[in-house]
Image: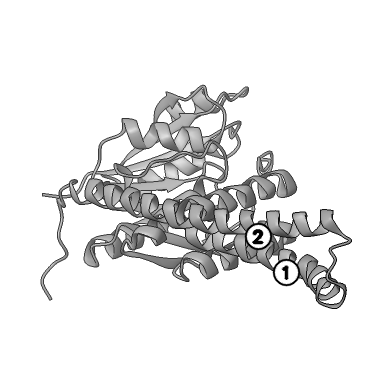
Amino acid sequence: MRPVVAVLVPCYNEESAISKVVADFRAALPEATVFVYDNNSTDRTVDIARAAGAVVRIERLQGKGNVVRRMFADIEADIFILVDGDDTYDAPSAPQMIELLLNESLDMVNAVRVESSAAAYRLGHRFGNRALTGFVAWMFGSRSSDMLSGYRAFSRRFVKTFPALAGGFEIETELTVHALELGLPISEIRTPYRERPPGSVSKLHTYRDGARIARTIFNLIKGEKPLAFFSIAALVLALMSVGLAVPVVVTYMHTGLVPRLPTAILAVSMMMIAALSLTCGLVLDTVTRGRKEAKRIAYLSVPIRFMPPPQ
């Protein structure tokens, strides 16, 4: 029995690239079904994808994250290949990703982009990716060197238990942090990354989408590591409180008076808020642990259909 493979291609206005993407993945994975989910294209993307042999479906809610959420909910398969529809990723690498996924019983294989030309990867995107990947590695563990790659292979167990809350390009951050936080078995391979074909325009806005990704990371840290988040806030407030209180205390020790009463009240208030922040962190850390246990149980409830071959 061979695993059922589904290639998932989210796209928007990719008529210049989608035909080649579908053809390349059908050639690389002849037994796989290629699903193209169109996200309100205003060109001929849908007709071209259907003519190329893809199963075409529509997601009206705009944003890549919304499309991925719909894909993961709708499609049943044993192995899922998620790839952007802009023809920048290497289809012949897909069999290697699947082989690694099966042989090591992994839940995610990430394609680390190796650009074939300077035009393939804009400087701003490269810098932003490295900065965000490094920050996530510092907070959640260093097991991914290209967090924002749009080319990945997943197990059914991962896909069917992934919450998929993001609406836009921050979905890649969510995928990575979900795997890191639950300690799922993941790996990565290096694959060629080429520039877009003529007529294809990137939908990723360096500053706007970078800000959304940074906000997602901030929210994930607050939600997944509340004790660290609120402890840092408590420490900052406590230090500010001490800084304000020291002159007041020194003056009181010398004169027995508190001439700067508003400053004293502010210092005490900030220390109280610091204590409350630390308490919130402790309480939310317990809640987060319960949520993580629930996600882990949901993950374990999905049966494994394919085991790695015996060594």
Q: How many marks?
A: 2
Q: Are marks 1 and 2 in contact (CB under 8 Å)?
A: yes
Q: Residue at x 71, y 64 (%)?
A: 118
| Of callouts 1 and 2, the N-terminal one | 1
Q: Is residue 207 above or below residue 249?
A: above
Mark 1: few/some/many CA within 10 Å (<14, 14-19, 20+): some
Determine whether 228 is above or below 89 in the image. Answer: below
Q: Is residue 151 above or below residue 254?
A: above
Residue to which mark 1 is pinned = 242
For the residue pair 95 and 285, the one nearer the viewer reads as: 285
Q: Is residue 118 left or right of residue 41?
A: right
Give the position of the C terminus as an image quadrant.
bottom left
Cα separation between marks 1 and 2: 8 Å
Helix, strand or loop for disc 1: helix
Q: Position of residue 124 (x, y in %)?
A: 73, 58
Left or right: where 96 falls relative to 147 = left
Numbered circle sitting on residue 271: 2
At a point 66% along the width and 44% down the height, the residue shown is: 204
Where is residue 136 drawn, in percent x and y? 54, 63
Q: Is 129 positioned to the left or the right of 174 in the image?
A: right
Q: Secondary structure at mark 2?
A: helix
